Image: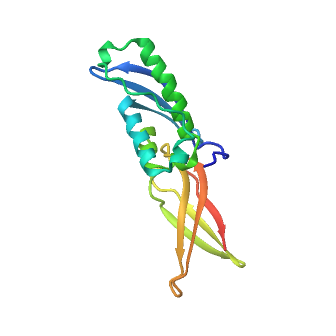
Amino acid sequence: MEGTAAPTYKCQVQHCQDVGDQVEFELEVLHRSGLRWQAWRRFSDFVQLHDELTRDFSREDVATLPVPPRRSWLPSFTQTMEFHEQRQHELQAYFTAVVGQPEFVRHAAVQDLLGVQPPDQPAGVRVVPRNEEHELEVRPGGDCEAEGRPIDEYRIEIVHLDTGSRHSFSRDVGTTGRAPQRARIG
């Protein structure tokens, strides 16, 4: 697995707070479009994420990640602030590696931990013949005045109704999805 392209997300584990019988960590998430949001997650959410990545990816792929922090069986009220700060640093190193790998970022568990919500459905699609190609335009859905949700890519499949032939492609977007997206297709 290679992480050569600019990362889709940057994430900082800002701080933690004790909320009764558990500790939650604040994630500040920055999408490459410039959208920014916060998500609060428990340590067990990170453990669950690692379990799902281990289940769904090869041993070699998961071995590229730092070892996640170990579970503590001590109740949260007995843990010191130094313990929580150390765990926060370890979570930061682990999660930075996760979001640095495009294959991991696309995984539903990573999207959930980041607090990513699906974008609005496109309002319309237009295909215009241009010489021996076609131009495809995807118009954004939802309220164009509102702040959009991040859109990383469109995955499009075109089916020729007469022949049944299929043409599939992905179009990298990386924006808020508020502007029409155009692509030339063969």
Which residue is painted at 42% across and 21% down in the image? 16
Q: Is residue 41 above or below residue 99?
A: above
- State which quadrant residue 25 falls in: top left
- Can residue 139 be seen in the rendering of this structure? yes
Instruction: Between residue 89 and residue 15, name the one nearer to us.
Output: 89
Q: Is residue 119 left or right of residue 177?
A: left
Which residue is painted at 62% across and 74% down in the image? 128
- State which quadrant residue 130 falls in: bottom right
Furthest residue to the left? 21
- State which quadrant residue 81 falls in: top left
Which residue is painted at 60% across and 68% down in the image? 136
Furthest residue to the right? 131
Q: Is residue 62 above or below residue 127?
A: above
- Residue 40 x/y as whole percent: 40, 30
- Can residue 144 be seen in the rendering of this structure? no
- Residue 108 x/y as whole percent: 43, 49
Quadrant that contains the C terminus? bottom right
Q: Is residue 133 above or below residue 62?
A: below
- Residue 179 x/y as whole percent: 58, 53
Q: Is residue 127 left or right of residue 69?
A: right
